[in-house]
């Protein structure tokens, strides 16, 4: 019984044309779009769905503005999906919405769904780097492709009130088999799906948070160059950088965050820690530094 990854994200938005243009600049493939909705996907076949925030097909939200209304987690088998659904139904309402999956709420009140993972393999070329005498490129210029193509959604983050944050994380570990990766008392809980080796698939953040809201979604790129091309491209088209570029302590990934008109923030990341069963989670009262290095001084709001 394994949850593999973030399978999809559904946003309730205000300005549909602005959001569609933003995600096209972000580098996502647009499948369809209109006045009331749009569908995008990643090369690994995760879905990003936009609807107007007043659309009754969306789960309710406690937020006023545009935001992510539902995260869908991808499950490896039909049997596992049914088993998770039956177990969740013991203490909460679970609705079978066909292609949208089994829909329910976590213990914090955030809506999520479970559906069968539909993973498409996508192989991007590794960057060819020369370092000291480890030479991978001879008689060849290194002019990276400027077209940024996010490979996949790596993680999502919610901000939660400090009180009850550990219980909120325990729901995912106890009921959905998420694994603890790292935790700090003053920052939050990093968890990964049991079928993922990313340092985190889900982070519940409470550094400065006093209320519950969707914080960000993160897309993996294959290199530092891609992140810098992507970030500068977004800035050139009016996107507002809210933190970065930099390299985080927890997860170790390079990051660059922007305001997302669809809701919350959105992150390019690359080179995240990968974990297996030998990883020992770290526990801190006071979180390690936000970043090992950071251009500018903006720290992502909690
Ligand atoms: Fe992130």
Image: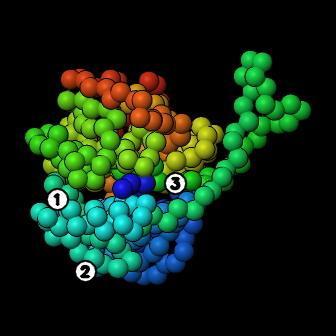
Q: Which of marks 3 and 2 is in front?
A: 3
Q: Which of marks 2 and 1 is nearer the N terminus?
A: 2
Pointers 3 and 2 in contact (CB under 8 A)?
A: no
**Depth-wise, is mark 2 or mark 1 nearer the camera?**
1
Measured in 3D between alpha carbons, the distance from the residue under mark 3 to the one under mark 1, in whole angstroms, is 26 Å
Asked which secondary structure carries label 2, the reply is loop
Left or right placement of residue 236 versus residue 108 in this view: right
User: Is the residue 197 above or below the residue 12 in the image?
Assistant: above
Q: Is residue 180 left or right of residue 93?
A: right
**Residue 248, relative to residue 123: is it above or below?**
above
Question: In whole angstroms, how far apart are the C-alphas of marks 3 and 2?
Answer: 28 Å
At 48% across and 63% down in the image, what residue appears?
A: 46
Query: Is disc 3's CB within 8 Å of ligand 1?
Result: no
Residue 105 percent across, percent down from the top left: 20, 62
Q: Which of 83 and 21 is in front in this view?
A: 83
| Residue 139, image x, y percentages | 89, 32
* Label 1 environment density (alpha carbons within 10 Å; few <14, some 14–19, many ≥20): few
Label 3, on which residue?
Answer: 152
Asked if the residue under mark 1 is in contact with the one under mark 3, i.e. CB atoms within 8 Å, the reply is: no
Q: Which of marks 1 and 3 precedes in the sequence? A: 1
Question: Can you identify the residue that label 1 sits on?
Answer: 109
Alpha carbon separation for disc pair 2 and 1: 18 Å
Q: Name the residue under label 2.
A: 56
> Which of the image's four quarters has the C terminus?
top left
Q: Neighbour class for label 2 at 10 Å: few (<14), some, many (≥20)?
A: few
Q: Determine whether 164 is above or below 132 in the image.
A: below
* Residue 263 seen in the current view: yes
Q: Give whichever of 46, 224 is nearer the camera.
A: 46
């Amino acid at each position: 019984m394994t949850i593999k990854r973030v399978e999809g994200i559904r946003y309730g938005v205000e300005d549909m044309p602005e959001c569609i243009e933003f995600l096209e600049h972000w580098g996502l493939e647009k499948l369809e779009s209109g006045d009331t909705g749009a569908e995008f996907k990643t090369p690994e076949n995760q879905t990003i769905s936009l609807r107007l925030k007043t659309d009754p097909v969306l789960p309710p939200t406690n937020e006023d503005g545009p935001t992510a209304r539902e995260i869908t987690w991808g499950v490896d088998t039909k049997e596992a999906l049914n088993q998770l659904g039956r177990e969740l139904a013991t203490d909460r309402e679970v609705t079978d919405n066909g292609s949208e999956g089994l829909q329910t709420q976590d213990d914090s009140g955030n809506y999520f769904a479970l559906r069968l993972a539909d993973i498409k393999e996508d192989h991007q070329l590794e960057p060819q780097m020369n370092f000291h005498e480890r030479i991978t490129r001879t008689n060849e210029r290194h002019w990276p492709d400027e077209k940024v193509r996010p490979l996949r959604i790596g993680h999502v983050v919610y901000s939660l009130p400090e009180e009850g944050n550990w219980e909120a994380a325990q729901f995912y570990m106890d009921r959905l088999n998420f694994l603890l990766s790292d935790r700090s008392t003053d920052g939050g809980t990093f968890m990964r799906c049991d079928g993922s080796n990313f340092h985190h698939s889900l982070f519940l953040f409470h550094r400065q948070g006093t209320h519950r809201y969707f914080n960000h979604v993160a897309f993996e790129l294959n290199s530092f160059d891609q992140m810098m091309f992507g970030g500068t491209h977004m800035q050139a088209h009016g996107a507002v950088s809210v933190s970065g570029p930099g390299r985080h302590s927890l997860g170790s990934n390079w990051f660059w965050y922007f305001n997302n008109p669809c809701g919350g923030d959105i992150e390019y990341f690359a080179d995240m820690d990968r974990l297996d069963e030998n990883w020992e989670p770290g526990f801190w009262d006071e979180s390690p530094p936000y970043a090992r290095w950071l251009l500018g001084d903006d720290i992502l709001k909690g």
